[in-house]
Image: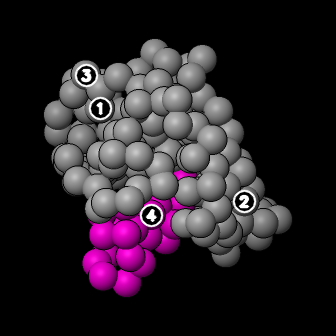
């Protein structure tokens, strides 16, 4: 299984008085623009996805919708509660077990969860390495199975700036 971990774009500040909760923070205009450009870079890579799972939090859903629109795969987008910003690696792994029929999946969500998940998939430990996944950035990890019995392989990782340069 190839797992594409895509972090949401730049969102409205937590300190904004118009926002009731962290889950309700939308992407800012610059975040929308940069996410679209990053997705255009992904399109140039020609990746094929069986499914895109997104956190239910607004900024991640907006990011996933942009990616699916650019990649022309809107029908493959599904919400995964376990990707919410307050969940754990264990939550995500339990949810992924139920998606074993898919070969190539994208998970759109938040840090530190996605960076921690990448580190876990690469080492099977949570404290052996760190992965710094930037906003609108992506890394792709290949694992033999879910849950993994062996460490995965980092296939590639790009920042939003690198993806934008590819478009």
Alpha carbon separation for disc pair 1 and 4: 21 Å
What residue range appears in magenta?
109-131
Q: Nearer the viewer, mark 3 or mark 1?
A: 3
Circle on res. 46: 3
State the SS at label 1: helix
Circle on res. 107: none
Is residue 17 shown above or below 11? below
Name the residue carrying label 4: 117
Question: Of all residues shown, which one is farthest toward the bottom?
Answer: 127
Please provide percent x and percent y for residue 4: 38, 43
Q: In the image, 61: left or right of 81?
A: left
Please provide percent x and percent y for residue 97: 58, 46
Name the residue carrying label 1: 42
Q: Residues within 10 Å of mark 4 (few under 14, many from 20)?
A: many
Q: Nearer the viewer, mark 3 or mark 4?
A: 4
Question: Of all residues shown, which one is farthest toward the front?
Answer: 149
Q: Residues within 10 Å of mark 3 (few under 14, many from 20)?
A: few
Alpha carbon separation for disc pair 3 and 4: 24 Å
Q: Nearer the viewer, residue 17 or 71?
A: 71
State the SS at label 2: helix
Name the residue carrying label 2: 23
Is residue 144 shown above or below 47? below
Please identify the quadrant where the C terminus is shown: top left
Q: Is residue 111 magenta?
A: yes
Please provide percent x and percent y for residue 45: 21, 27
- At x 25%, y 22%, the residue is 46
Q: Nearer the viewer, residue 145 or 44?
A: 145
């Amino acid at each position: 299984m190839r797992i594409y971990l895509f972090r949401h774009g730049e969102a409205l500040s937590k300190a904004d008085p118009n926002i009731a909760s962290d889950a309700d923070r939308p992407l800012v205009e610059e975040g929308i623009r940069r996410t679209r450009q990053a997705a255009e870079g992904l399109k140039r890579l020609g990746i094929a996805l069986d499914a895109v799972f997104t956190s239910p939090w607004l900024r991640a859903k907006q990011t996933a919708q942009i990616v699916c629109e650019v990649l022309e795969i809107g029908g493959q987008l599904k919400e995964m509660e376990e990707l919410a910003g307050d969940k754990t690696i264990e939550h995500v792994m339990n949810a992924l077990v139920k998606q074993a029929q898919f070969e190539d999946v994208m998970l759109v969500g938040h840090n530190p969860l996605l960076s921690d998940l990448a580190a876990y998939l690469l080492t099977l430990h949570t404290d052996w390495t760190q992965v710094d996944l930037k906003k609108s950035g992506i890394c792709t990890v290949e694992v033999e199975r879910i849950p993994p019995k062996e460490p995965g392989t980092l296939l590639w990782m790009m920042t939003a700036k690198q993806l934008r340069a590819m478009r």
